[in-house]
Image: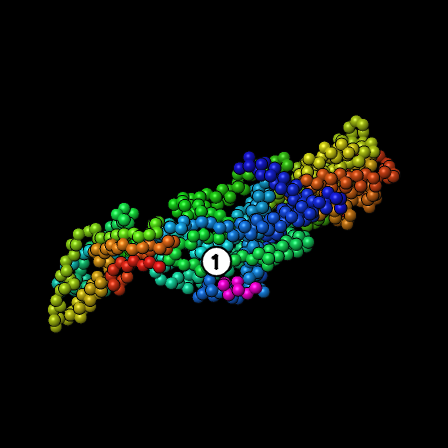
Amino acid sequence: MTTRAVLGRLVGGVASIATLALLRAGSLTSMQTASDDAAVLRLSWSARPERIESCHRLSDTELAARPAHMRMRWECEGQFATYGVTVRTDGRVFVSDTVRGGGLRHDRSMHVFREFALRAGSRRIELELRRIEADTRSDAAESAAVASGSADANRETREAQERRTRRSESLPSLLRIDTTFTVPPRSVVLVTYVVAERRLVLRTP
Amino acid sequence: MRALERPAHRLLRAADAAANRLYGWHLNPIYQTGAIAVALLAVLIATGLYLLLFYRVGAPWASVAHLQADPWLGRWLRSLHRFASDALVVAVALHAWRMFAQARAWGARALAWSSGVILLAVLLASGWTGYVMVWDAFGARLAISGARLFDALPVLSEPMRRIFAGDQPIPGAFFFLNLFLHVALPLGAAAGLWIHLSRLARPTLSPPRALLIVGIGALVALSILAPSPLAGEANMLAVAPHVAVDLFYAFWLPWADALPPWLAWTGAATTLGVALIIPVVTRRPRTGKDAPSVVDDRHCTGCNQCPVDCPWEAITMIPRTDGRTTLVARVDPSRCVSCGICAGSCAPMGVGPAHRAGRDQLEALRLVLGASPPGFSGRVVAICCEHAAPAHLAPLRAAGAHVELLGCAGNLHSSVIELSLRGGAAGVMVFTCPPRDCRGREGPKWLHERLYNDREAELQARVDRQRVAIGVMAAGDLAGTLVAWHDFTRRLAPAPPEPLISVDEDLDALCDPQPLASRVERQ
Ligand code: HEM
Ligand code: SF4
Ligand code: SF4
């Protein structure tokens, strides 16, 4: 080996060490993801939108004319509600948007996931989820008295119960949060919907 | 795209030259990137199996922390797994660059190219899942960015990001699916590697032992001396101020987070599309030096040598239709990359790309010999691969060489050497590329076998081996080329002169001790 070649190998050794150092640096590059006073407001929930429908009670003859598997004493037509969501912090509107149920016919649960940058510190947060459609639903179906002793009494009771359950599981027509609190630095403020309580809650770390 | 090949090639040559100066061509790692990638995959599988023993989907971060706390094995094996994955991305990127710069993406190589692109995508995806497994701030960030991109697709009505909202624990099913992908994707990559190499005969799957030991040893040393730290567990209700990002796997992260998802998807799809379309846009017409090899049935004796030697398995033996009893070679043009190696393997010179078969080489040599002054008049001939190191040709000429160029040293029919000596050359030195840089993949190897180990079509025993030599011409190592040249020419000085042949002599009789006519009769 010539002196030149030996020198080359020595430099090669140093270059290898430098390459390893670069490899490690590339593997562990520190990336700043948030400034010290940054925080996040996160809206995240899944809930069933309300169903807006008008119902009418079938007569015995009408009921008998339906195929056996489609016999329901109350027949309802309608759609699922859409909602306007508005978020303000310290009076400034962050978002004003329309949300609706999932699926092609919007008949599935409504899923919301939005994030907004916040500044840490004392903040007033106002959030409103308001049904857009006017309430055209006839409550007759829900509160209908069941003809006692009729052959269909059980079915009708069951139908009424199902409608009540569906209604209790769906979003109320108006939900609001209006609160002022201290947003900790680098925290995520989470707004979510608690199905059992039918209300929006705001969680801070 | 073809316009980019030239600058890419220039850059590659500069990188090769630098690495040759630093490590010598034997150990130049950029010549070995494909084989290094295979070795690194093996390291990943071995270390990954160990890590898998301790991983728990129910407590992902805690289980990794448990490994990290073990200074004897867990910590550095975890780091080795990480650094080897990083090195793998670098090796594969260099490998793809080499293939592109050397115009090795089209024709019969298109399958290797496109499967390579898919392999790289699978590799990046499995790195992604690997980091999510750790479930530190970086892992969570990758998961959330991935979910954001996924949510933009009309697949699920419930946004995947809801999993990471922080209102409920992350379901174990998520970590299970992620672990499944992290194991399944590399298994898919193994199958992909099989497709990747399916058109190559004898793919080189291991780098030279010294490089293997030193390379893996260096990664082990790095893992022991400067192991990768483990960041705190991901917290869905906090924003991490800094995240230690692995740029080799998450170079796209800043873009993906900053751009609207549809634009990020468009960018990714366009990049993939461009990568996949390279075989089409770099395709050349199959003429000139890219013409496929053809067999001249009259000369083929059915010896079965060229199918064995062809590095792309493009030649098969089929029954003849002309009444002779032997098989005859047939080249499948769609598998032939026009490397010309078969031209050097056929003793009766019956195969090779147009104008590059053994007979064409002898014809060309005859023209040189017929020129004035006739013959080589005692000069030493250097037959050089045109791809090796064009910058070395002028210094070689200045050192007294009569330089002849060839598409690949493996094309050289051994008769050319004999004819050159008999045409008055004092000696013949064949300069090849560094063997692992051969575009024909096996040119230098077969040349060596034909000259020194009696592989068909061997250099005849009557040729004085003292007057023949093989040298390596490596970019950046002009000194090496000239030292080899001077060693050879010094050795030549006392050699007795060969009887000069006439340029009109019968080629078959000259090049094959058993003339073609008698071979055919015997069959
Ligand atoms: C995990 C990733 C990869 C591994 C392990 C790998 C490994 C290899 C190996 C061992 C060879 C054979 C080399 C030889 O014996 O000559 C090869 C050939 C090849 N690779 Fe890859 N490769 C990978 C990714 C890629 C990528 C990303 C590309 C390009 C986009 C690519 C393009 C090619 C081509 C075109 C060939 C054929 C070379 C020729 O026929 O001349 N590979 N690869
Ligand atoms: S090397 Fe030549 S003789 Fe032998 S099979 Fe191939 S073409 Fe025929
Ligand atoms: S030129 Fe010959 S050796 Fe090369 S790929 Fe084509 S058939 Fe095979």
* Relative to B387, B147 lies left or right: left
Observer-nearest of B48 and B374: B48
Observer-nearest of A100 and A12: A12
Is the residue marked by circle 1 packed among few (<14), some (14-19), or many (20+) residues within 10 Å? some
User: Disc 1 marks which amino acid?
Assistant: Ala
Q: Is residue B66 above or below residue A52?
A: below
Residue under the image location 63 percent in, 39 percent down: B14
Looking at the picture, how far across and down is residue B487, in whole percent?
Answer: 80, 41
Looking at the picture, how far across and down is residue A15, in whole percent?
Answer: 63, 47
Looking at the picture, how far across and down is residue A95, in whole percent?
Answer: 29, 47
Residue under the image location 70 percent in, 49 percent down: B304
What chain letter is assigned to the residue under label 1?
Answer: B
The secondary structure that most of the magenta stretch takes on is helix
Location of the C terminus of chain A (image quadrant): bottom left
Q: Which segment is the magenta one? A: B64-71
Q: Is residue B504 above or below residue B312?
A: above
Q: Residue furthest bottom?
A: A149
Q: Is residue A46 above or below residue B477?
A: below
Observer-nearest of B175 and B270: B175
Looking at the picture, how far across and down is residue B362, in whole percent?
Answer: 75, 36
Tag 1 secondary structure:
loop
Q: Quadrant of residue A145?
A: bottom left
Q: Is residue B251 magenta?
A: no
